Amino acid sequence: MLELSAVREPQRRLLQASLREHSGMLDRIGALAQRYDELRQTDARTKARGEALQHLAEGVDRFEKLRSVVKDGATFYEDVKSQAERLRRGAADFKYSRDIERREQILQMGAGAGGGSGQGGP
């Protein structure tokens, strides 16, 4: 175990020295990133671009909602159209059958009236 720690000690020192050296760089990078964000928030063009992107996103959302409503409306009216066609066919069939019944009744009435006048005489 002593041998292993002896081998690791130089590497540990090297790692700590590297961390100390790069620690300042990381702090500087963090400070620069924070400054960049602050400048970006105060830049008029960046604000305008952000607002434009927000309006575009809202427009896309409205468009998607509208597309959904139109799609639902089209489905509804297709259903109404098919139901209306079914009702129209049903009404036409009913009218046709009533017309046939009416003609048959007229023929029966005509046959009954004509058949009785030829019988009976002086």
Image: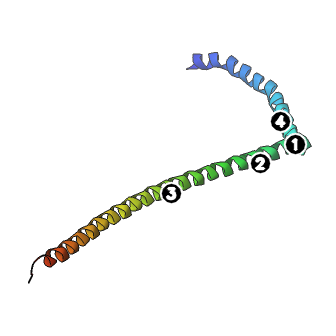
Marks 4/3: CA–CA distance = 54 Å
Q: State yes or no: discs 2 and 4 in contact (Cβ < 8 Å).
A: no
Q: Nearer the viewer, mark 4 or mark 3?
A: 3
Q: Residue at x 44, y 55 (%)?
A: 82
The label shown at residue 38 is 1
Q: Nearer the viewer, mark 2 or mark 4?
A: 2
Q: Secondary structure at mark 1?
A: helix
Marks 2/4: CA–CA distance = 27 Å
Residue 107 position by quadrant: bottom left
In the picture, which quadrant includes the C terminus?
bottom left
Residue at which label 2 appears? 55
Amino acid carrying mark 4 in the image: Ala
Residue 93 position by quadrant: bottom left
Query: Which of the pair 8/74 is nearer the observer?
Result: 74
- From the viewer's perspective, tell me whether residue 85 is left or right of residue 102: right
Amino acid carrying mark 1 in the image: Glu
Lower position in the chain sequence, tag 1 or tag 2: 1
Q: Position of residue 44 (x, y in %)?
A: 91, 44
